[in-house]
Image (cartoon, rainbow, N blue to C red):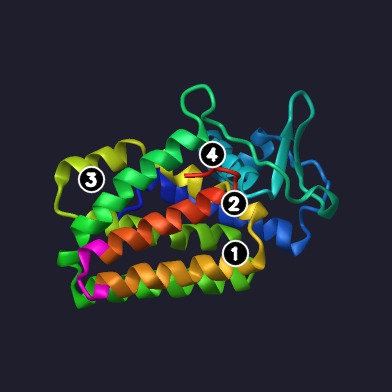
Amino acid sequence: MNHMTGKSSVTQTVAAKLQDMIRSGELQPDAKIPSQRILSERLQVSRASLREALLTLETLGLVRTFPARGTFVVGEADRGGPQPWRFDGRYTILDVFQSRLLVEGELCRLAAPHVTAAIADQLEHATRQFEEAWTADDLVAHVEADLRFHRLIVETAPNAMLRDLYRSVRDLMTESQRVPIPNTAVSRMQSSINEHRSILDALRQNDAQRSADAMRSHIRNTAACVGVSL
């Protein structure tokens, strides 16, 4: 089951390519990234997809854009610190985490009775990829595995209206899952992995209340990584 749209799939591929260029040293720390025109031609993608990929990498703390100067690879000295939140004109990150607590908690509760062995295996696979990508310092793949885990739960829930509500704000939900990454300590990430496993265990047991409680606990703890108290 793959619910990634064509647009997000292209963005993900471009973000992964750029991350590889940074990790390989092709794009050096503190170096300015080539212009979007040059880079889009080089990678053979549209400028729109490239812009979205760069925004993804900026949220993950790998690049930083400065007005009138361009986009630069983040060096070791500049890692961490508050990450940009690109929806400030519409919603705060607190708004998004409060909404996730309500919507994802309920979707998880509703999904639980419908989680088959096959769906549980897909969730297990996403959880393994989530952990392995973090260990490999592959932040793009790490976040994608996280998104896949949450989407699988959403798509398993039988309430079509809540599923559509989630999809209508997917960009906001997705961004809130990326923002904590640069400031997540190793110990907190291990806790996050364990929280995914707690959610999965409850879903395997088709335990609706425990699944919802585990999801809400996970969202609260993730929000805390960006200074949001729920």
Residue assigned mark 3: 163
43 vs 124: above or below: above
N-terminal-most mark, 1 or 3:
3
Residue 171 relative to residue 206: left or right: right
Closer to viewer: mark 3 or mark 4? 3
N-terminal-most mark, 1 or 2:
1
Q: CB under 8 Å between callouts 1 and 2?
A: yes
Q: Position of residue 36 (x, y in %)?
A: 65, 35
> Is residue 206 in the magenta section?
yes
**Label 4 neighbourhood size at 10 Å, few (<14), some (14-19), many (20+)?**
some
Identified by mark 3, the residue type is Arg
- Work out whether residue 134 can be spotted: yes
Q: CB under 8 Å between callouts 4 and 1?
A: no
- Work out whether residue 1 can be spotted: no
Magenta stretch, residue numbers: 204-209
Q: CB under 8 Å between callouts 4 and 2?
A: no
Q: Distance between the Cα atoms at labels 3 and 2?
A: 26 Å
Residue assigned mark 2: 225
Which secondary structure lies at badge 2? loop
Q: Distance between the Cα atoms at labels 1 and 2?
A: 8 Å
Residue assigned mark 4: 52
Q: Position of residue 209 (x, y in %)?
A: 24, 62
- Quick one: 5 or 173, which is closer to the camera? 173
Residue 127 relative to residue 28: left or right: left
- Quick one: 186 or 30, which is closer to the camera? 186
Which secondary structure lies at badge 3? helix
**Label 1 neighbourhood size at 10 Å, few (<14), some (14-19), many (20+)?**
some
N-terminal-most mark, 4 or 1:
4
Closer to viewer: mark 4 or mark 1? 1
